[in-house]
Image (cartoon, rainbow, N blue to C red):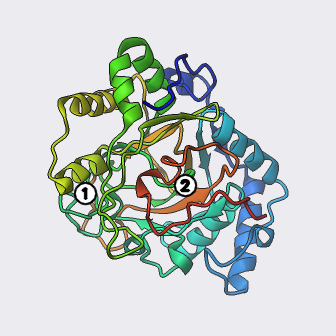
């Protein structure tokens, strides 16, 4: 049995919905001068012919905004684990501008990681910028990721330290609502009310790699990866019920009753509205979450037939916490063996 944390998390990462509604310190609204600063940095790069993923932080100077971005980074690492930037000067139909702005802001939060090629619809270098848009795939089919569909997604984490989502166009039908929840708060509840369930979550599950492997002969699923891992004095979470279910199907081994109870209990709490908070994205919103302490999900939506009015987000996966202690069996996330960088190297500036 792996080491378990036997006392509740009492810092800001163990929040519930009422905490975020009472204190909006996790929301950063850009002022007009800050918006102008971002726009000037983007225009300078456009004049040089540089696209998102092709420049460094030094190429995107933000002298006025930088101190607030540093505070936001601290909140991601040691606070709520959630930041929402509002008012980025994004044009809903100018994808190149949005990609430069996302990449430039993202460099203040970490190092970009490669993502799966099938969501890189803009041909960006090394698949660093993903298009979260309905490509017409069926989410129920093998190896299909939710990021390429309009289907509802259950609470989960991504295979990076931080995931950043920039909204270009919200869903026209009011769907596609983002939902975030503190996995630390859920751990506290399970510790107090269902310690047997918590033990199973520490033992973990296999996850389907959905074809995202480095070698043709690699196993289609991961070894067991803990949902909760207490290592080096730090608690981290890794959860994705979809990939757990898919792994069980690929292995031909249904989840044991104890495993099923643990998975369902985790989902039940993560979907409880007293724990989670919803966000209806607007153009120019940038959401960043710490994948080790926060899970995210979304509601389904239906795009209109009008060209260029479909829901569109851009995504970054960021390596942001090179000093965070992670157990070897946990550090690759549920994309263990995937193509993106899982090193813990220091972040370039």
Residue 336: x percent and y percent?
44, 58
Indicate which disc, 1 or 2, sits on the residue closer to the N terminus: 2
Residue 312 shows which numbered tag? none
Residue 43: x percent and y percent?
71, 76
| Left or right placement of residue 182 versus residue 241 in this view | right
Location of mark 1 (residue): 302
Query: Residue 311's image quarter?
Result: bottom left
Q: Residue furthest top?
A: 192
Q: Residue furthest right?
A: 63
Quadrant showing the N terminus:
top left
Q: Nearer the viewer, residue 236 or 252?
A: 252
Residue located at (72% from left, 63% from top): 38
| Left or right placement of residue 245 versus residue 274 in this view | left
Residue located at (28% from left, 47% from top): 244
Q: Secondary structure at mark 1?
A: loop
Q: Nearer the viewer, residue 32 or 188?
A: 188
Mark 1 vs mark 2, CA separation in Å: 23 Å
Residue located at (32% from left, 73% from top): 217
Q: Secondary structure at mark 2?
A: strand
Quadrant showing the C terminus:
bottom right
Location of mark 2 (residue): 164
Mark 1 crowd level (few <14, some 14–19, many ≥20, 10 Å Cα)? some
Residue located at (31% from left, 64% from top): 219
């Amino acid at each position: 049995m792996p080491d378990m944390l036997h006392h509740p998390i009492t810092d800001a990462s163990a929040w519930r919905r009422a905490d975020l509604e009472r204190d909006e310190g996790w929301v950063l609204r850009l002022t007009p001068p800050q918006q102008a600063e971002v726009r000037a940095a983007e225009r300078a790069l456009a004049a040089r012919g540089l696209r998102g993923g092709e420049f460094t932080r030094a190429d995107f100077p933000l002298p006025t905004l930088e101190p607030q971005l540093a505070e936001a980074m601290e909140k991601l690492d040691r606070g709520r684990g959630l930041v929402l930037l509002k008012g980025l000067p994004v044009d809903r139909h100018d994808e190149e501008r949005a990609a430069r702005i996302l990449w430039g802001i993202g460099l203040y939060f970490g190092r970009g990681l490669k993502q799966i090629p099938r969501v890189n619809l803009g041909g960006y270098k090394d698949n660093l910028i993903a298009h979260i848009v309905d490509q017409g795939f069926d989410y129920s089919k093998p190896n299909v990721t939710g990021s390429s569909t309009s289907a509802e997604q259950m609470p989960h984490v991504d295979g990076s330290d931080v995931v950043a989502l920039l909204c270009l166009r919200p869903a026209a039908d009011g769907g596609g609502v983002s939902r975030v929840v503190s996995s630390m708060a859920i751990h506290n509840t399970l510790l107090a009310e269902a310690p047997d369930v918590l033990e199973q979550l520490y033992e973990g599950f296999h996850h389907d790699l959905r074809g995202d492997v480095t070698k043709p002969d690699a196993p289609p699923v991961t070894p067991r990866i803990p949902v909760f891992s207490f290592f080096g004095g730090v608690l981290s979470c890794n959860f994705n019920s979809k990939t757990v279910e898919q792994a069980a199907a690929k292995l031909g081994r249904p989840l044991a009753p104890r495993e099923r109870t643990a998975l369902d209990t985790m989902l039940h709490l993560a979907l409880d509205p007293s724990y989670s908070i919803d966000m209806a994205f607007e153009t120019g919103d940038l959401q960043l979450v710490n994948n080790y302490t926060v899970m995210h999900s979304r509601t389904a939506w239906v795009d209109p037939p009008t060209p260029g009015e479909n829901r569109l987000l851009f995504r970054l996966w960021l390596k942001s916490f090179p000093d965070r202690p992670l157990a070897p069996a946990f550090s690759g996330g549920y994309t263990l063996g995937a193509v993106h960088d899982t090193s813990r190297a220091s972040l370039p500036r």
